[in-house]
Image (spheres, grey):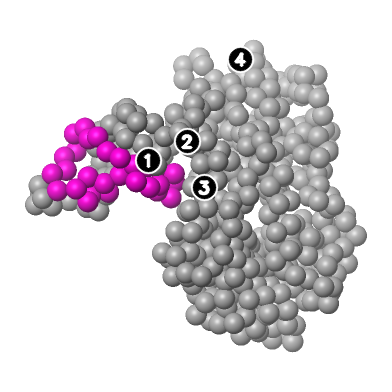
Amino acid sequence: MSKEIKNLINIEKNKDYIVKIESYGHEGEGVAKVEGFTIFIAGALKGEVVKVKLIKVNKNYGVGKLLEVIEPSEKRVKPICGTYKRCGGCNLQHYSYEEQLNFKTERVKNVISRIGKLEDVVIHNTLGMENPYNYRNKVQLPVGATGEEILVGFYAPRSHDIINMDKCYIQDEVGDKVIEITKQWMKKFKISSYDEKSHSGIIRHIMVRKGFKTGEIMVVLVTRSEELPHKQEFVDLIKENINGVVSIIQNINKEKTNVILGLQSLTLWGQDHISDYIGEFKFNISPLSFFQVNPVQTEVLYGKALEYAGLTGEETVFDAYCGTGTISLFLSKRAKEVYGVEIIPQAIENAKENARTNGITNAEFIVGKSEEEIPRLIAQGIKADVVVVDPPRKGCEESLLKALSEIKPKRIVYVSCDPATLARDLGVLDGLGYKTLEIQPVDMFPQTAHVECVALIEKK
């Protein structure tokens, strides 16, 4: 920011200000204004009067550090986690759960209006959980060390500093127990933790997966090399202390990378997978398989997608970005035929296996880019009555949206993990002759700012 602009609005870095929080940023930060200048303040709630230190000043906004809550909101609650303020695992524990849901609903409304330029869409209240804690069926945590102390926990925000923890309130409690056992084993047998800077040491990550309905547990040690001293002692400790464990895996990641899992997995004991259900469908889950981490809300999300699809049993459905075929299987029970497309070959192999496991014969899975393979299906004379898209965070390729508009499906169901890219794509579809009727936000990740949505879009 130029000195002229700074002086005009009297903003100074490292100066303290008393401000009132007017709204929320997209990550749940409080937003205040000083003489028209916007300041984002993590940890502050809408309606509060707070004292902040301005720690960063850019051209269009500043960042403040919360020093004191002078007039607290009635929506403020005491976080139950002792490492909450330092840990990057979740950032909304100071919100009441009601306020978390309100924030997520308002966030979706804001981006649909501001980015999508759509004003007449019905946006429902966010569907929350009865118990918004201990919902994650998978945890994967980095392992490090400070001197003799072994560190296991989430990274601090915007860093790779591990915040050591004994308990995490958003993951299944079995994860806490596995972490404790692993630390004891590493200390007893002097097993080294991974050092990112020197690319040395053995244990990189601990991963635990648990079947919500089956109770089956998988424990995975991610190692820098195939060498794993005293692995039998580790296996014995897990078997003796973890009820429900059916799979103990060593995953090997030799690369100097931020990617957690390597491509090679060795089964140290038991099965190479666990099983779980979404609705009536059974899925085998390997260390590398994608599987939604909140099983309770996944059924809510997929149930809403199926409702919006409005299937009668006579429709041909395209499922773009189908992943391991979870939504495709839900659709197959009420559709004539389903074509799932996904760029990752292993995911398509998993989708085919999942279809076989569940006796599904009217779903076909294709490897490739959705924006390329779906036009090929169209060129072969295969026309979809309904299209479901569940893209990654970056949203859909515009070429795919244009291809879909050309075949004129009567209905599109858009499952989104990012409201901003959803809003952008809904704006594109609006220009291509499709009207967004309604959006249902679903709270898949309580205590965080993330929200998933299902949108119902029909031909104008």
Q: Earlier in the sequence, mark 1 or mark 2?
A: 1
Mark-to-mark CA distance, 1 and 2: 9 Å
- Residue stretch rendered in magenta on the structure: 9-38
* Residue at which label 4 appears: 187
Q: Which mark is residue 75?
A: 2
Q: Which mark is residue 102?
A: 3
Mark-to-mark CA distance, 2 and 3: 11 Å
Mark 2: give few (<14), some (14-19) or many (20+) Cα within 10 Å.
some
Q: Earlier in the sequence, mark 2 or mark 3?
A: 2
Q: Amino acid at mark 1?
A: Gly
Q: Nearer the viewer, residue 439 or 449?
A: 439
Whole-percent x and y of residue 99? Answer: 51, 41
Mark-to-mark CA distance, 3 and 1: 14 Å
From the viewer's perspective, is 342 left or right of 103?
Answer: right
Residue 109 colored magenta?
Answer: no
Q: Nearer the viewer, residue 335 or 262?
A: 335
Numbered disc in front, either 3 or 4: 3
Can see residue 217?
yes
Q: Amino acid at mark 4?
A: Lys
Which residue sits at x=50%, y=14%?
Answer: 148
Query: Vertical placement of 147 versus 95: above or below?
Result: above
Q: Secondary structure at mark 1?
A: loop
